[in-house]
Image (spheres, coloured by chain):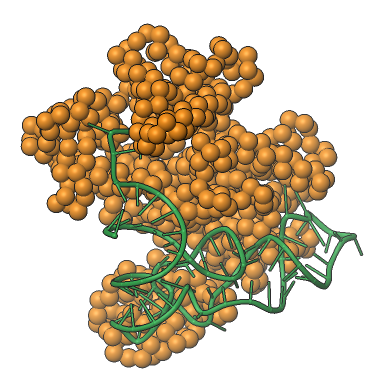
Amino acid sequence: MSGQNKKMITQILADQFVASFKSIYCQDIDRNLVQVEKTRKDFTGDLTIVVFPFVKLSRKSPERTGNEIAGDMMKQLEIIESFQIVKGFINFTFRDSFWITQLSINPNDVDRGDSMNRPEHGVNLGHPIVVEFSSPNTNKPLHLGHIRNNVLGDSVARILEASWSRVIKVNLVNDRGIHICKSMLAYQRWGNGETPSTAGIKGDHLVGKYYVRFDQEYRKQIRELVDTGLSQEESEKKAPLILEAQELLRKWETGDQEVLDLWNTMNQWTYEGFDETYNRLGISFDKIYHESETYLLGKKLVAEGLSKGILQQREDGSVWIDLTADGQDEKLLLRSDGTSVYITQDLGTAELRYDEYKPGVMIYVVGNEQNYHFDILKLILKKLGRDYADHIHHLSYGMVELPDGKMKSREGTVVDADDLMDVMFRTARDVTEELGKTGDFPEAEKEKLYNTIGLGALKYFILKVDPKKNMLFDSKESIDFNGNTGPFIQYTHARIKSVLRKATQDGQERSFSKDHLKQLLPKEREVIIWLCEYPAVIAEAAKMLSPAIIANYVYELAKTYNQFYQEIQILKEPDPDIRNFRLLLSEKTADTILSAMHLLGIEVPEKM
RNA sequence: GGUCCCGUAGCUCAGUGGAUAGAGCAACAGCCUUCUAAGCUGUGGGUCGCAGGUUCGAAUCUUGCCGGGAUCGCCA
């Protein structure tokens, strides 16, 4: 078998279009302007090329141009059976034999062209890609917003790995800072030495409980101070609890053993909780950074910037960068007490990561609320002469909103990640049992199936939405299992597998002679065309960093297959060539569904 | 106020320069003696936020306005 990459049919058509245009009109046209699309349902044909952009050069009417070009293309490419011109559109129909041949091509052997040709990340072929995602705080459990981040980051990593190069998944855990000290302080005050095991609570939830407790008590103090006549702002700064938390942070930074012990203990609880959640979500990392180990790194860069005169130090000792010339404000990089802020440590970790992996691109999966932060980060790195700043890409995704607005941890309006997965599991169980599908399943297999379905529904629900858009989650309306959903696609896969199992039991041969296939039925042809599109879809998803493109594709594929399944018999088809052809078509569809869902991080069951 | 993002069917979302703007949900009407009905078929539902501009052609690009969100901390 040759590993030679095969061109996609769209590429073959586009290339021939360019060649035919040249031979007829003696003009070179821009290959990128040749759009090859699937022919719309209401017209006859398989693929369509739009000729409008080229009529200036042909100096003939769209119909005339189309006819001349398509006529020549048909002479050159024997795979074209016929064409029809409608206005400025050439609708090509290919021979059945061609489509049948396409079915046997492995999508991995297909040349997908440049999948990363966008300027932001079209660089350094052969270098790995670093994808940072998740990056939780250790003071509270994960919620739905984190799930979007994790599921998105994981899927993007899978898509890039499949289409471009080695991917290193990294997680930068935010394990220090004032917010962690808040949980610690509340625990010192009100914890009575409870632990996850004595309290019977998952570690991250236990820590989160004290974070919430801190906030409640803190607010109480603020109210009291406001009542004595202080301003809101002043009260927030002067409340004893916040002062104590700040003191705790200072002690942490000076290495106070007692504080470090508590910090270690509580973080450990959180990590154990997180690991459980990550496991359940099916998410893993190649490298985990801890902010406690990296937060000092940026200072070297600051010192360098000062010596180069890019940064300025004020009388109080704080260090700033003046970005007014770039249309931004002045930005603080070191506090007057010499400690670093968020962006400072991010400068340091970017440098560390670049030195460690020399990546072709560093992708940060971070919510769009931090757009400004990343603009500034790149700008500062650029000014410091770091060329890799051009290869930093902020994959900025939208917020998950609830019917009454954004999720807020402290107001208790968050949808907890663990709770949500529990709900999804139970719903999957209830729906499945109601349908009476799993009567003969062993208990362990049921458990696994309900997890697969529940998680599939959740992940698909999130991933089918364009990452950059905000999305709405209404907990009153549970996530659907019918229509454009994960379970629908999983079900299609399971049903195909069931047919294939029966075919194997029957001992039927899977081979067929394509000469004996008289004519493809419209639905058979439609499914094949969708299958052929898969490589281009992966490329597009990689280019756009958008799992939604895969999700919407695999839904269309499953839907089309279901129509085929509905109206055409497979096992009962008497002609063995036709039957085996349909089995192959089904098998390829199942493979493609499996592969596409895998890129979304969603498993598909053999039976459901 | 400055900057950025979003506005498509009752709801959730596709479509981002090409043909008469599509799905799912919800509603209604059909299809299981036939390979898994988590399925399939049909019906109704739209001034693509509004107004101008560019183009042979605009939901898509551009300008302005309206509506929603984010952000502009010695928080992360």
Q: Is residue B11 left or right of residue B62?
A: right
State whether residue B56 is above or below residue A256. Answer: below
Residue A8 visible to the viewer: yes
| Residue occupying the point 59% across, 23% down | A202
- Nearer-the-camera pick, B13 or A279: B13
- Nearer-the-camera pick, B54 or A448: B54
- Nearer-the-camera pick, A190 or A42: A190
Q: Is residue A25 left or right of residue B17?
A: left
Rendering coords of residue A449 (x, y %): 70, 39
Rendering coords of residue A395 (x, y %): 38, 47
- Nearer-the-camera pick, A459 or A570: A459
| Residue occupying the point 57% across, 45% down | A459
Seen as rendered, the residue at the extreme top is A257
State whether residue A301 is above or below residue A255. Answer: below
Which quadrant: the C terminus of chain A? top right
Seen as rendered, the residue at the extreme front is A228
Residue A166 visible to the viewer: no
Q: Is residue A350 left or right of residue A604?
A: left
For the colour orange, the matching chain is A
Q: Report which quarter residue A381 is drawn in.
A: top left
Rendering coords of residue A409 (x, y %): 51, 37
State whether residue B60 is above or below residue A504. Answer: below
Rendering coords of residue A385 (x, y %): 14, 40
| Residue occupying the point 34% across, 10% down | A256
Q: Report which quarter residue A20 is drawn in.
A: bottom left
Q: Report which quarter residue A125 is drawn in.
A: top left
| Residue occupying the point 47% across, 49% down | A399
Q: How many marks?
A: 0
For the colour green, the matching chain is B
